[in-house]
Image (cartoon, helix red, strand yellow):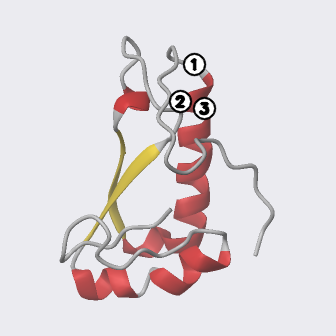
Amino acid sequence: MLSRKIIGLQRKKVKLVRHNKKWSVLYKREVKLLHSVIGKYIKTVEHIGSTSIPTAKAKPIIDIMIGVGSLKIGNKCIKPLEKVGYVYKHNAIKKGRHFFA
């Protein structure tokens, strides 16, 4: 597994901060990584959540949504994403979706 700096919050802590221009840079860097690992499965990638809104205070967590063709294809992404440091949270948000932290 690669050693990567993680931004965000301690568990069970909520903290809103002013928008940081670096979030856009971090998002773009992460998209490059995602494309290098699972690019053949990706149909779309979106920066979602409060860090994607320049005028909003936000929790300092970069939320990224990836669209793939089907849940079956999503299953093929689990191991490659785990190899680069993502933690798979099966059905953590909503049944029928894949979620990684």
Dot 1 crowding, Cα within 10 Å, few <14, some 14–19, many 20+: few
Would you place residue 16 above or below residue 55 in this image? below
**Kind of element beneath mark 3:** helix
Would you place residue 74 above or below residue 46 in this image? below
**Kind of element beneath mark 1:** loop
Residue 25's disc number: 3
- Compute the Cα span from label 3 to label 1: 7 Å
Residue drawn at (24%, 81%), measured in percent from left and top? 71
Q: Position of residue 31 (x, y in %)?
A: 52, 51
Dot 3 crowding, Cα within 10 Å, few <14, some 14–19, many 20+: few
Q: List the single residue furthest toward the right.
A: 3
**Kind of element beneath mark 2:** helix
Would you place residue 89 above or below residue 15 in this image? below
What kind of residue is marked 3?
Val
Are dots 3 and 1 in contact, CB under 8 Å?
A: yes
User: In this figure, which residue is indicated by the disc labeled 1?
Assistant: 21
Residue 47's disc number: none
User: In this figure, which residue is indicated by the disc labeled 2?
Assistant: 24
Residue drawn at (55%, 41%), measured in percent from left and top? 28
Residue drawn at (44%, 30%), measured in percent from left and top? 51
Query: Residue 53, located in which quarter of the rendered image?
Result: top left
- Compute the Cα span from label 2 to label 3: 4 Å
What kind of residue is marked 2?
Ser
- Compute the Cα span from label 1 to label 2: 6 Å
Query: Residue 70, located in which quarter of the rendered image?
Result: bottom left
Where, quadrant-wise, is the N terminus in this rendering? bottom right
Are dots 1 and 2 in contact, CB under 8 Å?
A: yes
What kind of residue is marked 1?
Lys
